[in-house]
Image: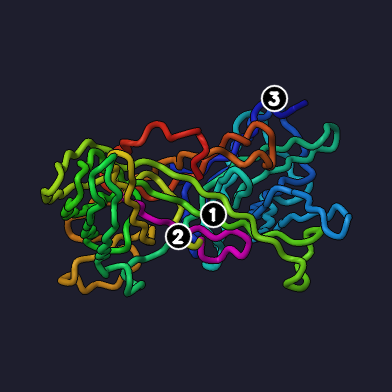
Amino acid sequence: MKIKKLEIHYVNRDQVFYAGQNIEGYILLVLKKTTPINRICLHIGGRGNFLQFTKKINNRQETYLAEVNYLSINLELIQPGQILSKGEVRLPFSALLPSSIPSSFEGSDGCIRYYCQVTVSTPEDSDATEGRNFTVIHNVDLNSIPNAKVPIVAKQTDIIPGICCTSPGLYKVNFQLEKTGFVPGEQIKFQLDVDNRTSLRSEWVTLTLRQIIKYKCFLNGRVTVAENTLTQTKTNNIELYNKQIIIPSRQKKHLEASARLPSLPPSKLPGCDIIDISYNIVLKISIQIEEMNIERQILIGTIPVRDDACSSTSQHTLRPDTAPPSYEECVTKAFRKGMKAKQSTWRPSYPYYGGESTVATLPGGNWV
């Protein structure tokens, strides 16, 4: 083998590119001696996959799966028959990513994965190949979604039974979020007003982010009629806030707190027709032997809501008080189906605002 080293490098060290922008980089090729080259081809690809599963229908085992190609670009990096000298060669590449492709995603049952794969063909040796994944971000600008700026106000009254001979009583909660749309790394600020008219005391307040993933798959992988389509739903929970808040019987309490969002893919996954993602905020208050739960849907985007005073409509304009985002790896249980086995632990990175992530571990290791 005359090839000593073959690597793919991206100009963006985070390996993150936006839909509608150029993906750029170079191929690093190190040759042991001067070598004639048949061809050097770069394939830039992207596809969505869903785990295959079976379902018994009319005493028959039917197979459902989904595979969708989102990106396929082939580049010839040198002229056929060219002779390359011994040592290091760098071959630059650039290609425009379609603006319609969805964001990268890695889940326990499916993925949307983008990659580059280079193939070097010489007259004497077998082909040498190397691959490397990259992240695509399909921007979700929360400023283009009117509901993203709307506060969430949830009022709920439950009748809580008493213990032993005590009578039941009313438990009233007013739960408020300052808005509906957030970005990873942002603090979710919430207010809580509790009126405990029961004979019991409440003890804990928990705020949980619930991710709901819907995977769509088709009979034998073929998109035909609606009757041959099935949807699998996965729900993952992460605890954002958990604190002991004692509210004695017949007393009121006001609470203002916040919790930071971890690195997450955006809501809906625009451009994807086999995976849909939604997020709910779940408030839980424990009242000795009972629980009160309030659940409301929120939106996760990639560009934060701007202040009303900021009139710019540029896609990448941030709020005046918001620093440019870093790119944090998503905490994920990776989908085990990739271009190469060694890449099965790869995770996409998403824009993350507000500094270093504070979320290190997740319940059950089954997030996303």
Coordinates of residue 72 in the picture (x, y in percent): 67, 58
By what rule are the colours in the image chosen? Answer: rainbow
What segment carries the magenta color? 269-283
Question: Mainly helix, strand or loop, the magenta region?
Answer: strand
Which of the numbered marks, if any, corresponds to residue 267?
Answer: 2
| Residue identified by numbered label 1 | 213
Disc on the earlier residue, 3 or 2? 3
Disc 1 on helix, strand or loop?
strand
Residue 355 appears in view: no
Which of the numbered marks, if any, corresponds to residue 32?
Answer: 3
Please indicate whether residue 240 sits to the left or right of residue 175 in the image.
right
Give the quarter of the image for residue 2.
top right
Disc 3 on helix, strand or loop?
loop
Spatial separation of the CA atoms under disc 3 and disc 2: 49 Å
Q: Determine if the magenta segment contains residue 280.
A: yes
Task: Name the residue type under label 3.
Answer: Lys
Q: Residue at x 51, y 56 (%)?
A: 103
Task: Name the residue type under label 2.
Answer: Ser
Disc 2 on helix, strand or loop?
loop
Coordinates of residue 23 in the picture (x, y in percent): 52, 54
Please indicate whether residue 257 sits to the left or right of residue 288 in the image.
left
Spatial separation of the CA atoms under disc 1 and disc 3: 49 Å
Q: Residues within 10 Å of mark 1 (few under 14, many from 20)?
A: many
Coordinates of residue 31 in the picture (x, y in percent): 68, 29
Seen from the viewer's position, the closer of residues 234 and 40 is 234
Residue 315 appears in view: yes
Q: Which quarter shows the N terminus?
A: top right
Q: Which circle, 3 or 2, is nearer the viewer?
A: 2
Q: Residues within 10 Å of mark 3 (few under 14, many from 20)?
A: some
Seen from the viewer's position, the closer of residues 85 and 9 is 9
Q: Determine if the magenta segment contains residue 108.
A: no
Spatial separation of the CA atoms under disc 1 and disc 2: 10 Å
